[in-house]
Image (spheres, rainbow, N blue to C red):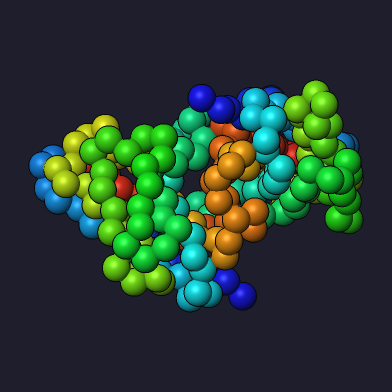
Amino acid sequence: GENVEQHPSTLSVQEGDSAVIKCTYSDSASNYFPWYKQELGKRPQLIIDIRSNVGEKKDQRIAVTLNKTAKHFSLHITETQPEDSAVYFCAASVGGSQGNLIFGKGTKLSVKP
Amino acid sequence: DVKVTQSSRYLVKRTGEKVFLECVQDMDHENMFWYRQDPGLGLRLIYFSYDVKMKEKGDIPEGYSVSREKKERFSLILESASTNQTSMYLCASMLGGGDTQYFGPGTRLTVL
């Protein structure tokens, strides 16, 4: 079946450093790639997304890049802050579906002050 | 602002009990989803629904069923709860294909 691989599973950075999380997907028909942030005890919330007709998207300190040829996409967080500490999930749309997503297993990001 | 609510935040049930988890969204979304979340396994799709009275199996439907009698409400049913169904259950809704999924707060179910 289709799947999404996410790396690393845990990431620890110093406040102010950058963090990068990478995902690869298998379904060549995937065309929508959201990223969710889940703080401890809370629901996953969308932080940024990208569609297949765009190679990069940026929103303040967060950016996502997409390489459709290689089937991978990445989340970049610059100038990390302690409040960025959370679990981050990448996802890819299932080709041919009406919106189903396949999620990566998550990355626990810890930002040390 | 999209609002997705779930009937309980925490639930403790006994093995063999029938369990109902309810999800309600207030944005007239067509699509609704049930996931379970376990440490190290991410979010796994149990069932989803594209319309009232329609349902489709996800990746791990065994031991579960669903009901969607009204557009705003999507229920997950555990016919006979087992200890391996102890998990966090998350509901999500989405307007249409290719849109963002919005999650509920989750229900942490413990089956003893």
Whether residue B11 sits left or right of residue B87 in the image: it is left
Identity of the residue drawn at 88% across and 41% down:
A55
Whether residue A88 sits left or right of residue A77 in the image: it is left
For the C terminus of chain B, give its image quadrant.
Answer: top left
Q: Where is residue B63 in the image (x, y as percent from the top left)?
A: 23, 38
Q: Where is residue B79 in the image (x, y as percent from the top left)?
A: 16, 46
Identity of the residue drawn at 29% across and 53% down:
B66
Q: In this view, does B60 lie above or below A85?
A: above
**Residue B59 visible to the viewer:** yes
Residue situated in front as seen by the camera: B10 or B2: B2
Residue situated in front as seen by the camera: A67 or B42: A67
For the N terminus of chain B, give its image quadrant.
Answer: bottom right
Identity of the residue drawn at 84% across and 31% down:
A67
Identity of the residue drawn at 82% across and 36% down:
A66
**Residue B100 visible to the viewer:** no
Q: Is residue A79 above or below residue A20?
A: below
- Can you name the residue that lies furthest to the left here? B16
Q: Position of residue B81 (x, y in %)?
A: 18, 42
Residue A6 falls in which quadrant of the image? top right
* Picture mark count: 0
Residue A33 falls in which quadrant of the image? top right
Q: Is residue A44 above or below residue A102?
A: below
Q: Where is residue A97 in the image (x, y as percent from the top left)?
A: 55, 45
